[in-house]
Image (cartoon, helix red, strand yellow):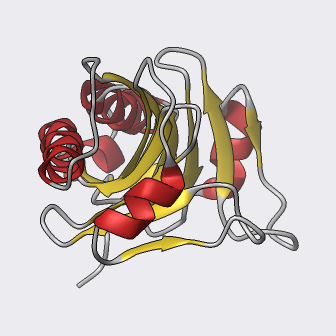
């Protein structure tokens, strides 16, 4: 182990920024009826086919469609997502909207931020790391497509990163841990100053 590796103790961190999920109710919904009964919703079918419902807690937005499908965004954890869906269903029922089926939730994308807590030599990383793209004239970060878990990481020289494409929270932590270890092995990391 070289002196460089010895100076770096890996302590990567992650934070979920947004979960995008599809919620399926096996029934059609009357969006005009929902708009007339539920306060603080937006429905302008000439501009957008879905009804927009915003919750304050947890701070999420639901796009509700006639087909019974919803897209829920804004949750910062899976438990927050489930809580939001429960509140939406409860709110609809409270205002006389019949919900006959149990909602099925499918996470489509988790967007998270991460930090390796070390500086990254992006030139070296781009050269040594498979499935990577780095064009600093176009974008200041290295784009790495990880195969397992199947996510995309945008890695910056500061060691900070954005992770997209995860379907489960644990995939975010696993991806950041794996890339930090790989960058350390490839000698692409160096300590932050100050």
Residue in the image at 43% along x and 17% along y = 26
Q: In which quadrant of the rendered image does the N terminus lie? A: top left
Q: Position of residue 128 (x, y in %)?
A: 69, 33
Q: Position of residue 146 (x, y in %)?
A: 58, 26
Task: Identify whether 54 is placed above or below 71.
Answer: below
Task: Identify whether 112 is placed above or below 21.
Answer: below
Task: Identify whether 139 is placed above or below 147.
Answer: below
Q: Residue furthest bottom?
A: 194
Q: Position of residue 106 (x, y in %)?
A: 41, 24
Task: Identify whether 145 is placed above or below 12.
Answer: above
Quarter of the image where one finds residue 117: bottom left
Q: In this orientation, does residue 90 appear?
A: yes
Q: In this orientation, does residue 187 appear?
A: no
Quarter of the image where one finds residue 45: bottom right
Counting the numbered discs, the total is 0
Q: Position of residue 189 (x, y in %)?
A: 43, 51
Q: Nearer the viewer, residue 70 or 107?
A: 70
Q: Nearer the viewer, residue 185 or 97?
A: 97
Q: Nearer the viewer, residue 3 or 59?
A: 59
Residue in the image at 13% along x and 45% along y = 90
Residue in the image at 87% along x and 73% along y = 137
Residue in the image at 27% along x and 21% along y = 100
Q: In which quadrant of the rendered image does the C terminus lie? A: bottom left
């Amino acid at each position: 182990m070289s002196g460089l590796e010895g100076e770096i103790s890996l302590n990567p961190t992650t934070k979920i920024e947004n979960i995008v999920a599809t919620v399926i109710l096996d029934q059609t919904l009357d969006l005009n009826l929902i708009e007339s009964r539920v306060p603080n919703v937006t429905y302008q079918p000439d501009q957008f086919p879905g009804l927009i419902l915003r919750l304050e807690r947890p701070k999420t937005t639901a796009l509700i469609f006639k087909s019974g499908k919803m897209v829920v965004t804004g949750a910062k954890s899976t438990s927050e997502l489930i809580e939001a869906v429960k509140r939406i269903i409860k709110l609809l029922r409270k205002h006389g909207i019949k919900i006959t089926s149990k909602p099925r939730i499918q996470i489509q994308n988790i967007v998270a931020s991460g930090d390796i807590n070390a500086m990254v030599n992006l030139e070296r990383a781009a050269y040594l790391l498979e499935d990577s793209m780095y064009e600093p004239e176009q974008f200041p970060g290295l784009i790495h497509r990880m195969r397992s878990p199947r996510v995309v990481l945008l890695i910056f020289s500061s060691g900070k990163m954005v992770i997209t494409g995860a379907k489960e929270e644990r995939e975010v932590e696993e991806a950041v841990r794996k890339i930090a270890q790989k960058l350390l092995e490839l000698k692409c990391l160096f300590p932050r100053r100050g």
